[in-house]
C-alpha cells in the first residue's frame, strides 16, 4: 500500500533532477492556496498514514513560510486573493493559507506562529463541531484501530468482523469502514454513530478535546489576520445529498457563523473536496448563496481565468513527507497533478 503512484514517480524525478526550474519562466499562474488541517507535535505512538497526510508540525509551518518568503511571494488574505483574480495587478505571486474544520490546534499551535510571522489566514468552520453535534470520525476510527487487533460492528443489517493485527490490516480496515459508511443509506452521521456505538467510543469527548468552541472562534475572528469561512454544518460529501440538503448544509453554516461572529461569511470550503464530492451543482449553489470563493481539495495553482471558476478553486495540500518537493514543483509550475486552469 506504500507503492508510489505514477504521479509520485514523475514528481520525484522532476524534483531530484532539478528539472522543474526550466518550467518556471513559462509558468503563468497568479498564486497558490495552501491547505492545512492539523498543526501538531508527533507523540511517538503508532499512527495510520491516512490521517498523518493532514498533519504537519509547527516547524514545518515555519519552514513553509520561510520557503515562500525566499520565493518572493506575497502573503495575502482570501479577500485580497479575490481582488487579484478579478484583475488587481501585482508584481508578485501570492500565497494564501487556509485551515479546514476548526481544530483547537489552529488556535493554540498554528496561530502563534502565524501571528509572529504576520501571516493572514482563513479557517473554515464546520458548525456542528463547536455546536458539539458532530464527530471527528477519522481520528476516532484511527485510535480505535490502533488499539485493537480486531473490530466488530453492525451496519445496514450486516455484521462485520475485521482483523486489525498488523499495520497493513489496520490501514485496509480504515479504508473498508470508510467506504461502508460513505455508502450507507442511513447517512454518514448516523452510520458513524452506529459503528462507534459498538466500539464503545465516547465520540463527544473527542469532539470536545479536538475542536474549537464558539467562544474561541469568536476570539479568533477579532484578529485582523483571521478570516472565518464556512465548511458546512455536519461535514458531509455534498454531491451525495439532494440539492435541498446540500443548500441547507452550505447556507445554514454560513448563517450560523455570521450570527456567532457578527461578520459576513463569504468564503467556503467543500468537505472532502475531490471531483467526486464537488460537482458543478455545488459550485452553482455556492455562487447563489453569495460566497465570493469556494475551495476544493483538487491540486493546482490559481490562474487569472479562475475568476470564471471562483467556486471551484484548487489548493495545495501541505503533506508532512513531501511538502518540499510538492511546493517547489508547484512554484515552478510543473507539479504533476491536476492543474485546474479551465
Image (spheres, rainbow, N blue to C red):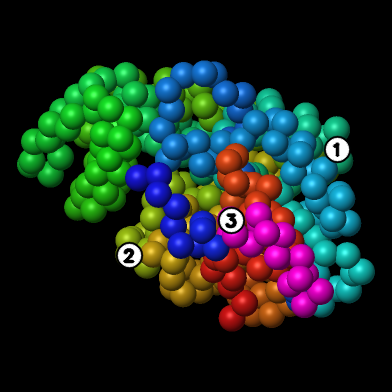
Q: Is residue 255 visible?
A: no
Q: Is residue 16 magenta?
A: yes
Secondary-structure class at tag 3: helix
Viewer-nearest of discs 1 and 3: 3
Residue 261 shown left or right of residue 153 in the figure:
right
Question: Which of the labelled discs sits on residue 12, or is there none?
Answer: 3
Secondary-structure class at tag 1: helix
- Residue 50 place in picture, x, y as percent: 42, 40
- Residue 147 place in picture, x, y as percent: 32, 19
**Of residues 47 and 137, the one drawn nearer to the viewer in this rendering:** 47
Residue that numbered label 2 is attached to: 242
Q: Is residue 89 visible?
A: yes
Which numbered disc flags the more N-terminal residue, 1 or 3?
3
**Of residues 11 and 105, the one drawn nearer to the viewer in this rendering:** 11
Question: Which of the labelled discs sits on residue 117, or is there none?
Answer: 1
| Distance from Cα at disc 1 to Cα at disc 2 | 43 Å
Which numbered disc flags the more N-terminal residue, 2 or 3?
3
- Residue 270 place in picture, x, y as percent: 50, 57
Q: Residue at x 60, y 46 (%)?
A: 322
**Of residues 121 and 332, the one drawn nearer to the viewer in this rendering:** 332
| Distance from Cα at disc 1 to Cα at disc 3 | 30 Å
Magenta span main SS: helix
Q: What range is drawn magenta here?
A: 11-26
Which quarter of the figure is the N terminus placed in?
top left
Which quarter of the figure is the C terminus placed in?
bottom right
Above or below: residue 244 compared with residue 254 = below
Does the CB distance between marks 1 and 2 fall below 8 Å? no
Does the CB distance between marks 2 and 3 fall below 8 Å? no
Q: Residue at x 79, y 43 (%)?
A: 65
Amino acid at each position: 500500500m506504500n507503492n508510489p503512484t505514477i504521479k509520485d514517480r514523475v514528481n520525484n524525478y522532476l524534483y531530484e533532477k532539478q528539472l522543474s526550474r526550466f518550467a518556471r519562466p513559462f509558468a503563468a499562474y497568479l498564486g497558490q492556496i495552501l491547505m492545512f488541517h492539523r498543526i501538531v507535535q508527533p507523540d511517538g505512538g503508532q499512527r495510520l498514514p491516512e490521517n498523518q497526510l493532514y498533519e504537519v508540525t509547527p516547524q514545518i509551518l515555519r519552514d513553509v513560510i520561510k520557503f515562500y518568503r525566499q520565493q518572493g511571494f506575497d502573503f495575502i488574505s482570501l479577500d485580497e486573493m479575490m481582488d487579484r483574480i478579478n484583475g488587481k495587478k501585482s508584481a508578485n505571486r501570492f500565497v494564501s493559507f487556509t485551515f479546514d474544520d476548526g481544530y483547537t490546534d489552529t488556535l493554540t499551535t498554528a496561530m502563534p506562529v502565524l501571528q509572529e510571522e504576520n501571516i493572514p489566514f482563513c479557517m473554515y468552520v464546520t458548525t456542528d463541531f463547536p455546536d458539539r453535534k458532530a464527530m471527528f470520525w477519522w481520528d476516532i476510527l484511527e485510535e480505535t484501530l490502533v488499539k485493537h487487533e480486531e473490530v466488530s460492528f453492525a451496519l445496514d443489517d450486516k455484521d462485520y468482523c475485521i482483523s486489525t493485527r498488523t499495520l497493513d490490516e489496520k490501514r485496509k480496515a480504515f479504508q473498508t469502514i470508510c467506504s461502508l459508511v460513505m455508502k450507507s443509506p442511513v447517512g454518514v452521521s448516523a452510520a458513524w454513530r452506529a459503528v462507534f456505538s459498538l466500539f464503545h467510543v465516547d465520540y463527544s469527548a473527542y469532539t470536545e478535546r479536538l475542536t474549537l468552541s464558539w467562544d474561541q472562534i469568536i476570539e479568533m475572528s477579532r484578529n485582523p489576520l483571521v478570516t472565518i469561512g464556512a465548511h458546512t454544518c455536519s461535514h458531509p460529501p455534498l454531491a451525495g445529498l439532494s440539492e435541498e440538503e446540500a443548500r441547507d448544509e452550505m447556507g445554514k453554516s454560513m448563517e450560523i457563523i455570521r450570527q456567532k461572529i457578527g461578520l459576513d461569511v463569504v468564503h467556503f470550503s467543500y468537505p472532502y473536496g475531490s471531483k467526486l464530492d464537488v460537482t458543478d451543482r455545488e459550485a452553482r449553489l455556492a455562487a447563489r448563496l453569495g460566497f465570493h470563493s469556494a475551495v476544493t481539495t483538487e491540486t493546482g495553482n490559481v490562474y487569472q481565468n479562475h475568476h470564471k471558476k471562483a467556486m471551484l478553486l484548487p489548493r495545495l495540500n501541505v503533506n508532512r513527507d513531501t511538502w518540499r518537493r510538492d511546493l517547489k514543483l508547484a512554484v515552478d509550475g510543473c507539479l504533476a497533478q491536476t492543474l485546474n486552469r479551465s
